[in-house]
Image: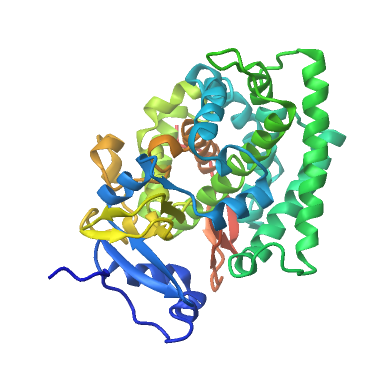
Amino acid sequence: MTPSLPPGPHGNPLFGSVLSAAKSELAFFSELGRFGDLSTFRFGRKRFYFVNHPDLIRKILTSQNFVRTSLSRSLLESFLGHGLFSQEGEAHLQQRRLMQPAFHLKRIDGYGSIMSRFASRMLDSWQDGETRDISHDMMRLTFEIVSKTLFDADTGEQARQVNAAFTSIMRAINTEYPLYSVLPSWVPVRRWGASRRAVLELQRITHSIVQERRASSEDRGDLLSMLLMARDEDGTQMTDAQVSAQTLSLLFAGHETTANALSWAWLLLSRNPDILRKLQAELDSVLGGRPPTFADLPKLKFTEAVVKETLRIYPPAWYAERAPLTDTELGGYTLPAHSPIVISVYVTHRDSRFFDQPERFLPERFLGVEDRQLPAYLPFGAGSHLCIGNRFALMEAQLLIASIAQRFELALVPGTEVTTRALITLGVEGLKMTLRRRTPAS
């Protein structure tokens, strides 16, 4: 007879697995993955299901019967507003259709020169032998790039205001998220006020920018211009409030996640000098000392493989929650309607059933292989919730790694204690690295 529940940890009779997850969510979910394709656990009296097979994950992400849980939607709406990330069903599909032209390949191509230019500006300020917090530098660099490509904001008061408000939001997310995941937002917790004020301030700034740009009807070649010009099949366009919400979502997606991926890449390269040498050899051969351009990307195959392998080992979007709208069969079990399902591609990407030597940093596994040939590789999700900016993110990471690795070698400071931050995104802290200027081989 088939058991009614999939296997999983028994946990504490009162708290379930809350204490185990609190020690390390990554370790907890990795342990759940050892129970098989589908497992279960409790947080208090609430039962969750954990899915760890790419076929089941794709089924969840591509079916309209599975939607974000009410908690995850509430969290996203609280910090990012009613943008693409917090919508479901027809509202999500309509917003995605309206936003899609902004990410057309020809449009994205034009952003390559911006990325290289901002990277060069940062590198010109670096000094040989100095020690820097590389995570901080990557956050600042990606924010400058997304501000320029999204708002056409480079310097000036608007850019400063956006940066200050967005930094406050990200700080609030990183400090408040663990508490928010346990307590609902209506519980009176004093420090939540900081995030609310920051969100309101950024909404005020973005709404002002949107109104100003709408009035001018000027196409400045940025993503905001495309959002304002976008029309659905029936002629519908986004309201100013919707454009403002999408802008906030794109700020988050184009800044935090890419910066985290770059930070992990520098850590992995510093720990694998043989791979770093292969990367440098490719850059020297293809670029010959000049800054990389979009046209160089097809020749930078190993650089692309470094990016993809980094996303496999440390996927920034490491965690997601979904819930079925109806009682649903999954993996041989019937899951009750609205029961929360947890997906962690961090765990699936490290499963030896799907990747040989999964803990090793081996960019070669992506050479000569299309992503679709690796069905367990899901750094950008799948289905209608596939990251709309995945091409933008891959191009940005490839260009920035090429720009930086060509001119500098980054070495982790001996004795540095690097900390993993597994919140909404998978980040790294304490990444103190010494810069060593290099001269590209001719």
Q: Position of residue 314 (x, y in %)?
A: 44, 55
What's the coloring here?
Answer: rainbow
- Location of residue 67 in the rendering, given as x and y in whole percent from the top left corner: 45, 47
The mark total stands at 0
Q: Based on the displayed image, in which of its 4 quarters is residue 361 positioned?
A: bottom left
Q: Which residue lies furthest to the bottom in this view?
A: 13
Image quadrant where one finds the C terminus: top left
In x, y percent, where is residue 195? 75, 56
Q: Does residue 422 sit above or below 69 in this rendering?
A: below
- Residue at figure coordinates x 25%, y 48% from the top left: 55
Q: Is residue 279 above or below residue 331?
A: above
Farthest residue to the right: give it: 157
Q: Is residue 352 visible?
A: no
Q: Which quadrant is home to the N terminus?
A: bottom left
Left-right relation of 51 to 373 = right
Task: State whether residue 427 is above or below residue 295.
Answer: below
